[in-house]
Amino acid sequence: MAIKDKLSGNEAIAVAMRQIDPDVVAAFPITPSTEVPQYFSQFVANGQVHTEFVAVESEHSAMSACIGAEAAGARTMTATSSQGLALMWEMLYIAASMRLPIVMAVINRALSGPINIHNDHSDSMGARDSGWIQLYCENNQEAYDNLIQAIRIAEHKDVQLPVMVCYDGFITSHAVENIELLEDEKVKEFVGEYKPQYSLLDKDHPISMGPLDMPAYYFEHKRAQAEAMKNAKRVILEVAQEFEKLTGRKYGYFEEYKMEDAEVGIVIMNSTAGTAKFVVNELRKQGIKAGLIKLRVFRPFPFEELGKALSHLKAVAIMDKADSFSTAGGPLFTEVRSAMFDYARDTKAVSYIYGLGGRDVRPDEIMKVYQDLLEIARTGQVKSTFNYLGVRE
């Protein structure tokens, strides 16, 4: 029977880590992710886990320690935010290229400068091409569920890639919500015993990791890495199906909310999806056919599936909580619009960048986006493709 509790997102992640009982956790505190290693270190001190907790002097060292531990065959986890993730940058690529299934909670926070400790997605979006799988979470329950599934996805023999589980700093991370936890033994049974394919400590089968890779082989190694990411698409759904049998909670690449007959919709990620669902419900009461897609999996990107899901809409707004400074929309917009070129050419698409640096996004602002979409659907004309929502111009 599921255990009902009231936990913040960071507590939920720490509890999931306790239930997984990884071999190594290496971490350096940075707001708003600090609570994750703080809570988990208490479990270590109390003898509730067998984990070797490594307190390091920087996030670069944290990821370096994770890489060393995982290469030695230890199930390894960590957590970070913002500049901490940026300081890991060099090592993110190394972890992915060495095919090390590290799992990391990324508590999304704005990147400096100017200095800002509040939420947006500029940190994880900046790492989107580092070779890590990225899962995004609307609330505490999804953060807990995704972290448990991340272990299985990362360690699958056809994947062997690191995974980020991303959720909104000071919103999901610190807000307390009702949550359903699995029993400890069910989590342990679901993730299973870690049996690494390769280990630096396996003296009978010596291997090299991180060697110089010149033009004769580098390209082939990157191609193999890309194939592993492609395999992850299948594995993510397989793991989700097993998780649904265990919990009744269903996960896919994205969640479609009232999309069956929708004429206008938005694509969004993380906690603002909850606000947007409220707005969709209000519009439906007025007889307006509004819908929403909440993207869960950004890497690997569900190119075909998302494009087809948007094909029946007259207009869609793609909302980014990060700016790419490309003058061509945020990172989510550019990828979704690319998918629409193949699968939803008749659907008009507009970009909205919102909520940077923790700026609140109110229901009336989301309502304004839908009103803009309804006008586009009525006239067939897009007056402004690239937009900012809630900013003083």
Image: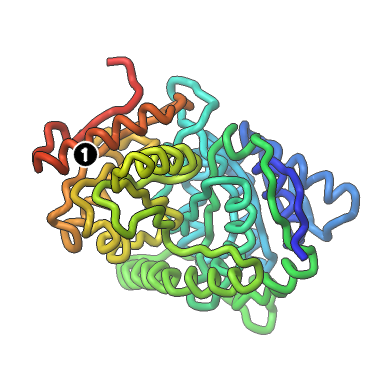
Residue extending furthest bottom? 204
Q: Position of residue 201 (x, y in %)?
A: 69, 72
Amino acid on which disc 1 is placed:
Leu
For the image, the number of numbered tags is 1
**Can the viewer see residue 229?**
yes
Left or right: 298 with respect to 307? Answer: right
Left or right: 320 with respect to 14? Answer: left
Q: Residue at x 48, y 60 (%)?
A: 96
Front position in the image: 305 or 67: 305
Up/down of 223 relative to 359, above or below: below
Q: Secondary structure at mark 1?
A: helix
Up/down of 98 relative to 10, above or below: below
Q: Please tell me in which quadrant of the rendered image residue 331 appears.
A: top left
Q: Residue at x 21, y 34 (%)?
A: 386
Front position in the image: 154 or 392: 392
Mark 1 Cα within 10 Å, few/some/many (few <14, many 20+)?
many
Q: Please tell me in which quadrant of the rendered image residue 385 appears.
A: top left
Q: Position of residue 260 (x, y in %)?
A: 33, 60
Left or right: 271 with respect to 187? Answer: left
Q: Position of residue 232 (x, y in %)?
A: 45, 69
Residue extending furthest front? 286
**Can the viewer see residue 87?**
no
Color theme of the render? rainbow
Q: Residue at x 36, y 28 (%)?
A: 365
User: Can you say which quadrant of the picture contains the C terminus?
Assistant: top left
User: Can you say which quadrant of the picture contains the N terminus?
Assistant: bottom right
- Tag 1 residue: 374
Left or right: 384 with respect to 357? Answer: left
Q: Residue at x 29, y 57 (%)?
A: 261
